C-alpha cells in the first residue's frame, strides 16, 4: 500500500462506507445485528471484535510488516497474552535489563502459575546459550532497553532461539516500527506499550502485538477474547490518530535527543551518557544495523550519585518530572525510585544515580537550555 507514512494514515482507514467520513468512526455498539443465526457482517459482540479496533489492528500490523495485529487495554495486557501462550513448566529467558513491569509480570504473576524464567544479558549470545534449557520456549527481548538503552542483536538472538524451536518476542516500545522492524529481523512477535510513542500524546493507555504466523495469531486472538483485556473504542481511536503522525514525531524526537546528548556529554555533572547513537556506546554498531535512527530516549548517570540524580530531576522546567515516555512533551525521571521501583533488590535493579529522559518535540533550543541550566545548578 506504499510507504510507512502512507500506511500509517491509510491502512485499515478507508473512508467510512456508510457516510464517506475520512476519519474512522468511534464505533460504540457492543452488539451487532444478525440477519439469521450466525449471519453477520464480521462483528457479533464488541469484546470479540469492534470496527474501530479492527482499523487500529490493521494499521499497526501493516506498520510492523506483520499479518495479525492485536490491540489490548495496556502494554502489560499485551505482554500477558504472549506469556499465556506458554504452559506450566515452560521456561522463558528475559533480559537482565527491562521494563520493571515486564519483570514483575513474569516473576510475580506467571511464576505462581508454573512458568520458570532466567534473566540474561542478551547482548551476550554465549550467556543465552548457557541459560538454555530443554523447556525454554520463549526469549523476551527489549531493545533499546528501558532504562539502560542497551541494544540487543535481534537477528542473533532469533538465530539461537529458532535453532532450539523457541519463539522470540521483541518489546518494540522504545524504537517503534518506524525505527525498527523486529519481524523482518527474525522475531516472532513485536509487542508495544502503545501508551508511549504510538499514542504519542500521554492521553491513552494501550498495548499491541503483531505477528506473521497464522497459528500464533489465532492463539493470541483466542486469548484476547478469552481474557477480555481489550481497549475501548475511544482508546483505539486515540492510538490510531497517534499513528498518523508517528513518523514525523519520531524524526523530531531523534533530532532533539541528539542535541540533548551533546549537552550531557562532557558536562561535569554527568558521569556517563547512555545513548545508542554515541559511537562509543557498546551497541552502536548493532543499532546502526537494525534501527533507522537512535530514538528519543536518553539516560545518564549523575556524577554526584543518587543524591545528585534526585536533586537534578527537580531542577528542570520544561522536562517534567513524571513517569512514562514517548509523548510530545519532554519528561525526566529517576528510574530506581519511579518506573523501576518494582525491580529493587532483583537481578534487574537499577543504578540509583541513573536519570532517564524522554526527549519530546518542543523547540530544541528550549530543551537544551532547560537541561543545561539544571545541570549547571547541580554541578
Ligand atoms: C518498554 C515497555 N514495555 C511495556 C510497558 C508496559 O506498558 P503499559 O504501561 O502500557 O502497560 C512499558 C511501560 O512503561 C514500557 O516502558
Image: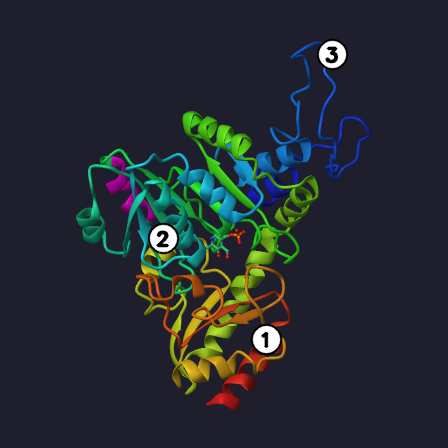
- Label placed on residue 35: 3
Image-based side of 37 in relation to 302, left or right: right
Chief secondary structure of the magenta span?
helix
Q: Position of residue 138 (x, y in %)?
A: 32, 40
What is the quadrant of the N terminus in the image? top right
Examine the rendering and report whether any part of residue 67 can be seen.
no
Mark 1 or mark 2, earlier in chain? 2
The colour style of the image is: rainbow
Q: Does residue 182 sit above or below 347 in this rendering?
A: above
Q: Kindly indicate the quadrant of the structure image that contains residue 37.
A: top right
Q: Indicate if the residue with disc 1 has its beta carbon within 8 Å of ligand 1.
A: no
Q: Residue at x 62, y 36 (%)?
A: 11
Examine the rendering and report whether any part of residue 102 can be seen.
yes
Q: Residues within 10 Å of mark 2 (few under 14, many from 20)?
A: few
Image-based side of 128 in relation to 244, left or right: left
Query: Nearest the camera: 5 or 221?
Result: 221
Q: In the displayed orientation, state which residue is furthest to the top.
A: 36
Spatial distance from mark 1 to mark 3, Cα to Cα? Answer: 58 Å
Q: Which residues are magenta?
A: 154-162
Give the residue pinned by disc 1: 367
- Label placed on residue 289: 2
SS state under label 1: helix
Amino acid at each position: 500500500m506504499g510507504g510507512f507514512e502512507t500506511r500509517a494514515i491509510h491502512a485499515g482507514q478507508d473512508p467510512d462506507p456508510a457516510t464517506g467520513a475520512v476519519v474512522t468512526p468511534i464505533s460504540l455498539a457492543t452488539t451487532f445485528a444478525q440477519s439469521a443465526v450466525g449471519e453477520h457482517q464480521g462483528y457479533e459482540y464488541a469484546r470479540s471484535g469492534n470496527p474501530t479496533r479492527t482499523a487500529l489492528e490493521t494499521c499497526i500490523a501493516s506498520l510492523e510488516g506483520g499479518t495479525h495485529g492485536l490491540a489490548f487495554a495496556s502494554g502489560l495486557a499485551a505482554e500477558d497474552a504472549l506469556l499465556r501462550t506458554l504452559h506450566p513448566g515452560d521456561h522463558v529467558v528475559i533480559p537482565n535489563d527491562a521494563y520493571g513491569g515486564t519483570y514483575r509480570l513474569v516473576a510475580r504473576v506467571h511464576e505462581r502459575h508454573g512458568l520458570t524464567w532466567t534473566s540474561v544479558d542478551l547482548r551476550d549470545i554465549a550467556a543465552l546459550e548457557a541459560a538454555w534449557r530443554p523447556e525454554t520456549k520463549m526469549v523476551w527481548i527489549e531493545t533499546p532497553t528501558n532504562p539502560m538503552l542497551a541494544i540487543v542483536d535481534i537477528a542473533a538472538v532469533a538465530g539461537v532461539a529458532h535453532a532450539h524451536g523457541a519463539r522470540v518476542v521483541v518489546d518494540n516500545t522504545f524504537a517503534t516500527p518506524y525505527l525498527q522492524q523486529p519481524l523482518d529481523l527474525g522475531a516472532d512477535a513485536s509487542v508495544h506499550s502503545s501508551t508511549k510513542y504510538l499514542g504519542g500524546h500521554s492521553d491513552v493507555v494501550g498495548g499491541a502485538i503483531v505477528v506473521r504466523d497464522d497459528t500464533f495469531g489465532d492463539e493470541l486472538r483466542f486469548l484476547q477474547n478469552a481474557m477480555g483485556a481489550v481497549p475501548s473504542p475511544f482508546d483505539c481511536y486515540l492510538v490510531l490518530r497517534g499513528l498518523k503522525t508517528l513518523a514525523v514525531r519520531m524524526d523530531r524526537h531523534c533530532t532533539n535527543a541528539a542535541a540533548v546528548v551533546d549537552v550531557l556529554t562532557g558536562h561535569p555533572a554527568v558521569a556517563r551518557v547512555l545513548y545508542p547513537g554515541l559511537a562509543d556506546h557498546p551497541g552502536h554498531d548493532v543499532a546502526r544495523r537494525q534501527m533507522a535512527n537512535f530514538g528519543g530516549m536518553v539516560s545518564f548517570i549523575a556524577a554526584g550519585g543518587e543524591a545528585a540524580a534526585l536533586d537534578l530531576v527537580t531542577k528542570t522546567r520544561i522536562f517534567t518530572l513524571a513517569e512514562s515516555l514517548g509523548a510530545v512533551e519532554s519528561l525526566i525521571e529517576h528510574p530506581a525510585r519511579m518506573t523501576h521501583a518494582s525491580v529493587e533488590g532483583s537481578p534487574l535493579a537499577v543504578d540509583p544515580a541513573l536519570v532517564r529522559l524522554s526527549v519530546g518535540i518542543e523547540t530544541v533550543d528550549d530543551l537544551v537550555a532547560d537541561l543545561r541550566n539544571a545541570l549547571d545548578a547541580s554541578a
